[in-house]
Amino acid sequence: MHGSAGRDGDHLRSVSSILRGATMTPHIAVLGAGISGLSIAYALEQAGMRVTLFEANARVGGPLRSSRIDGYLLEHGPHTLFQRTSALASLLTELGLDDAIVDARESASRRYVVRYGRPLALPQSPAAFLKSELLSTAAKLRLLAEPLIPAFDREGVDESLANFVERRLGQEVLDYLLDPFVGGTYAGDPRQMSARHTFGMLKELEDEAGSLVLGALKRKLRTPSSETPPAKRRLLSFTGGLQTLTDALAAKLHGELKLSATVTGLRRDESSWRVLYRRGKSSAGVSVDAIVSTLPSYALAELRFKGVTPPERELQRVTNITFAPCTLVATGFKREDVAHPLDGFGVLAPRAEEMHTLGTLFVSSMFPERAPRGRVNLTTFVGGARQPELALLDDDAVIDLVKFDLNRILGLRAEPEFVHVSRWERAIPQFEVGHQLMLDAYASLEEAMPGVFFAGNTRDTVALPALLNARHDHAARVTDFLQLATSPASS
Ligand SMILES: Cc1cc2nc3c(=O)[nH]c(=O)nc-3n(C[C@H](O)[C@H](O)[C@H](O)COP(=O)(O)OP(=O)(O)OC[C@H]3O[C@@H](n4cnc5c(N)ncnc54)[C@H](O)[C@@H]3O)c2cc1C
């Protein structure tokens, strides 16, 4: 990624020994203290740099926010972390979090999708697939014909995810599998999203073998059996909720964390940068050797640039990246007041079912101690790119929509005992068709402002594990820049 793909902790450790030998410790500003900013600051400090972290809010973590209210443990944003790699497992150990991890219950592997107005379990085996009502017989046959579908050979054309899936796997797979999945995970609309930039692996399979099935088989045969085994796959959270992760990262930092400090501008001085920020009524600045911005792309539009002129078209392109709004409604019920057994992860609502909600997580079924005894804790997502206007309704209206849908699909026997609304007006950036232009624009901005680097979920990806992993690449880019800036040839 970003020209330094796959650089890991070892590379940074060797660079850090060079930097430690230098007379001055490089000072880096990291803008934004969400999971990206915190983890990049951590990697930079591990590489021997001094870091000052700027965050506009009074707290760190961005949407990772957990709180216990009336005996319910609420997640205001993300609910789960999917661990697939040993790198993530090692990071959690390094942060001292092993004892705080809670694994999702085994039953969380069961996921429901609404069809014919009721939740149907996603089939988990070929036999269950054949019996499932989720897809019609015609759709199942169409799916099996996938290897016979010709590949799309217009090289370089960025296709929408909806088009890609409909073309390869058929309309019903798009409507009842892909659409609810991307609505629930990216708050996205597959008709707008780029296949290459969101489900790139599937697109690669088609490019490699002309078919998803044949491509997957080919890769399986090619994979050497001696390959390092990946870590145990775990869907997890922490006893105190996901905020534990960002709190632990923040606790590891030695540098200065400036909370309630809104970055207002960047000034290029002779051989350094100055970060201008506002705290309450006062303004100040900090001089640094390099800057890593993890600010949401729209926040860049508010910055004043001095001593440097970023290319206008590229800046505009980046600041215009679409964000989908999302409102989360947490509800608590007496167990007996919900008819459905809630025996799974949750239920997703496809667009084709014409509901008002994107999906509902069965939070207290997934993890223990998320609701008082005899109660259940549900979280329903409203809005997204599919129905942005619904996310912006007032609390009473949005709660009514949620109760209506919950009653329709889960069967309610009473009003919720507990309701809490969390709003994210700009929740998740959308990687739409043409996303490559945004990535190119970020690269041009970096070229025009040497020593300023862009990271975070508008550039990298939205998934937490990948954002954590990206910290090594960004730290390596900074160390490369500093090495070049201090090498004799450059002076
Ligand atoms: C409701 C919701 C549910 C989600 N669910 C999941 C999930 O289950 N699994 C998953 O993997 N991902 C999930 N995501 C996505 C994931 O949470 C995000 O992609 C990730 O947290 C983004 O982290 P970041 O650090 O890149 O950005 P952010 O967390 O947005 O960090 C940017 C920071 O910059 C700060 N800032 C903005 N402007 C300024 C300024 N001028 N000066 C200083 N600071 C500023 C902001 O306050 C913010 O703290 C979810 C997201 C949302 C909103």
Image (tube, helix red, strand yellow):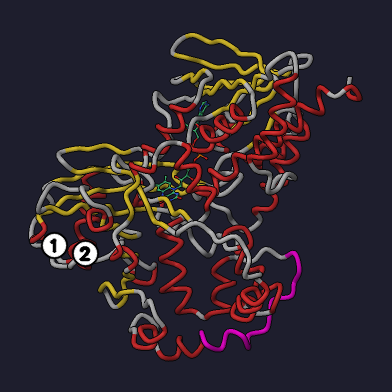
Residue 133 horizontal side relative to residue 396, left or right: right
Tag shown at residue 342: 2
Where does the image place residue 431, in percent across and percent down from the top left? Answer: 57, 53
Spatial CA span between label 2 and label 1:
8 Å
Give the image quarter of residue 246: top left
Where does the image place residue 41, in percent across and percent down from the top left? Answer: 56, 29
Question: 381 or 211: which is nearer to us?
Answer: 211
Where does the image place residue 6, in percent across and percent down from the top left? Answer: 68, 48
Q: Which amino acid lies under the numbered mark 1 shown in the image of this protein? A: Val
Give the mark toward the camera: 2 or 1. Answer: 2
Residue 484 horizontal side relative to residue 437, left or right: right
Tag shown at residue 338: 1
Q: Label 1, secondary structure: give it.
A: loop
Asked whether mark 2 and ligand 1 are closer than 8 Å, the reply comes as no
Tell me if residue 144 is in the magenta stretch: yes
Q: Residue at x 59, y 29 (%)?
A: 46
In the rendered picture of this protein, how many numbered marks are placed on residues? 2
Looking at the rendering, the stretch of residues picked out in magenta corresponds to: 143-156
Q: Label 2, secondary structure: give it.
A: loop
Tag shown at residue 467: none
Above or below 9: residue 81: below
Prevailing SS of the magenta stretch: loop
Q: Residue at x 29, y 59 (%)?
A: 105
Question: 385 or 11: which is nearer to us?
Answer: 11
